[in-house]
Amino acid sequence: QVQLVESGGDLVQAGDSLRLSCAASGSSLRINVMGWYRQAPGKQRELVASITRGSISNYADSVKGRFTISRDNAKNTVALQMNSLKPEDTAVYYCNAVIQETLIITRTYWGQGTQVTVSS
C-alpha cells in the first residue's frame, strides 16, 4: 500500500516563504509524476505544480516565478518551495503521485493534505 505523507503547512504572512515536503512510502515504487494540488474553501482542487521522473516541471500561471517544485527519485520525495506568498495562496495543499503499478496500469495516490494559510 502506497502512502503519501505531507509536511510543512503553516500560518505565515504575505511575502513570507514556506516549503512543503511529501514522502511516498511503499515497496519498489515506480513514480511517474509527482505534484502538488490545492483546494481553497468553496473552490475546486487545482494543480499547483507537477514534475516528471525526468524533472520536467509544470506550473499553474498563478504561481509561476514564485513556487519551485523539486523531487528526489531515490528517496521518493517531492518538495514545493513557495516564495512571495499571497493571501490567495491560502488552501489545503495535497501531494499527488502517479505510480506505474504494472506495464499498462497506473494509479494515482493522494496525501491527506496540509494547510497553508497566508495572512495579509
Image: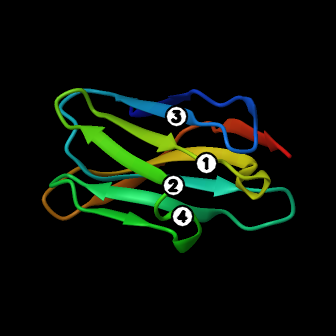
Image quarter of the N terminus = top left
Helix, strand, or loop for circle 3? Answer: strand
Residue to which mark 3 is pinned: 20
Could you tell which of marks 2 and 3 lies nearer the N-terminus?
3
Helix, strand, or loop for circle 2? Answer: loop
Count neighbours of disc 3 (C-alpha within 10 A) and say few if under 14, some if 14 to 19, many if 20 or more: many
Locate residue 62: give its quadrant. bottom right
Give the amino acid type for the residue marked by disc 2 in the picture. Arg
Give the amino acid type for the residue marked by disc 4 in the picture. Leu
Residue to which mark 2 is pinned: 66
Q: CA distance from mark 2 to mark 3?
A: 14 Å
Q: Decide: is 82 above or below 105.
A: above
The front one of 39 and 66 is 66
Helix, strand, or loop for circle 4? Answer: strand
Which residue appears at 71% of the width and 29% of the height? 10
Could you tell which of marks 1 and 2 lies nearer the N-terminus?
2
Which residue appears at 53% of the width and 60% of the height? 48
Residue to which mark 4 is pinned: 47
Could you tell which of marks 3 and 4 lies nearer the N-terminus?
3
Q: CA distance from mark 4 to mark 2?
A: 15 Å
Query: Is the Cβ of the residue at disc 1 closer than 8 Å to that at disc 2?
Result: yes
Residue to which mark 1 is pinned: 84
Q: CA distance from mark 1 to mark 2?
A: 6 Å
Q: Decide: is 5 above or below 103.
A: above
Count neighbours of disc 4 (C-alpha within 10 A) and say few if under 14, some if 14 to 19, many if 20 or more: some
- In the rendered structure, the answer to whether residue 95 lies left or right of residue 13 reads left
Please state which of the two labelled residues, at mark 4 or mark 2, is closer to the viewer: 2
Give the amino acid type for the residue marked by disc 3 in the picture. Leu
